Image (cartoon, rainbow, N blue to C red):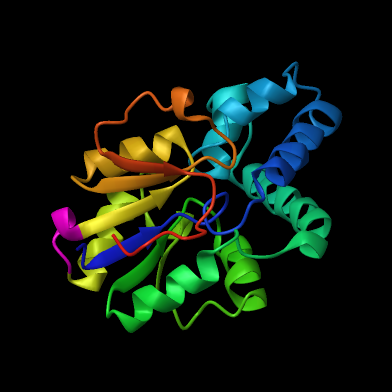
């Protein structure tokens, strides 16, 4: 049994990635006039918000202040649209309770900014499960770099090979592999064939219903 679980947030704890995609697509195409499709927007949705903007427009196109303002505006639009739908992915509540009862340490390892992480953890009352949170503001390099997950493991005090990462994105699974960690992939946004690295994936699931401790 793994002694620690590290969860990504968006698309892994809540099924909200389509709302993120719509918010980004709206800003990129309507506010910033980028020539990008909705499908291409989804492919760019990994890492920090500033990194997404740099991938689409190039480094130096926006100042740090402009990217921070765009990031915050995107998150406000996402939260306003998603809040009426805010709930855990099916079966996750029972799974988290079982993990806590079994003494498994848990943390959040997300590329989201604290504004978004707080929105989810506080509204869904999840702080009791996740005393450790590593956000975009806590790392220098985002996924697929392993820093998000290795930092969470270091704070938990658990060897990397005893951590299981829960992820919904190919880049997140790649980050877990780079950290020397196994991953469970949840297919809320991507299908299994879209994951280019799978040798560290122990299971693909659509939700947490009936999932036993691993």
The x and y percentages for residue 133 are: 42, 68
Using the image as rendered, state which of residue 27 and residue 46 is in the foreground. 46
Left or right of 140, for residue 192: right
The x and y percentages for residue 44 are: 57, 29
Residue 161 drawn in magenta = yes
* Secondary structure mostly taken by the magenta-highlighted segment of the chain: helix
Left or right of 182, for residue 80: right
Q: Is residue 79 above or below residue 195?
A: below
Q: Can you see residue 146?
A: no
Q: How many marks?
A: 0
Left or right of 119, for residue 96: left
The x and y percentages for residue 49 are: 58, 43
The residue shown at (27%, 80%) is 103
Residue 114 drawn in magenta = no
Q: Is residue 100 above or below residue 166?
A: below
Which quadrant is the C terminus positioned in? bottom left
The x and y percentages for residue 198 are: 31, 31
Q: Can you see residue 19?
A: yes
The residue shown at (17%, 67%) is 158
Q: Is residue 148 above or below residue 5?
A: above
The residue shown at (57%, 34%) is 52
The residue shown at (61%, 24%) is 56
Identify the residue at the far right of this view. 30
Using the image as rendered, state which of residue 54 and residue 39 is in the foreground. 39
Kindly indicate the quadrant of the structure image that contains residue 129.
Answer: bottom left
Q: Is residue 46 above or below residue 193?
A: below
Using the image as rendered, state which of residue 77 and residue 70 is in the foreground. 77
Which quadrant is the N terminus positioned in? bottom left
Left or right of 96, for residue 28: right
Bounds of the magenta span? 158-162
């Amino acid at each position: 049994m793994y002694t620690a679980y590290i969860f990504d947030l968006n698309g892994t704890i809540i099924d909200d990635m389509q709302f993120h995609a719509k918010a980004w697509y709206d800003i990129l195409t309507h506010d910033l006039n980028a020539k990008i499709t909705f499908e291409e927007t989804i492919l760019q949705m990994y890492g920090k918000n500033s990194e997404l903007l740099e991938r689409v427009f190039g480094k130096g196109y926006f100042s740090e202040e402009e990217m921070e303002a765009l990031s915050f505006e995107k998150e406000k639009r996402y939260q306003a649209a998603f809040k009426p739908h805010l709930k855990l992915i099916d079966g996750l509540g029972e799974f988290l309770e079982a993990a806590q009862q079994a003494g498994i340490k848990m943390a959040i390892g997300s590329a989201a900014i604290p504004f978004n992480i707080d929105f989810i953890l506080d509204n869904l009352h999840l702080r009791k499960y996740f005393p450790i949170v590593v956000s975009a503001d806590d790392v220098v390099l985002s996924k697929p770099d392993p820093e998000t997950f290795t930092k969470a493991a270091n704070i938990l005090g658990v060897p990397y090979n005893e951590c299981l990462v829960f992820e919904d994105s190919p880049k997140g699974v790649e980050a877990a592999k780079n950290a020397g960690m196994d991953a469970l992939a949840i297919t809320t946004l991507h299908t299994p064939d879209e994951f280019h690295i799978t040798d560290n994936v122990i299971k693909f699931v659509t939700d947490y219903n009936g999932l036993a401790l691993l």
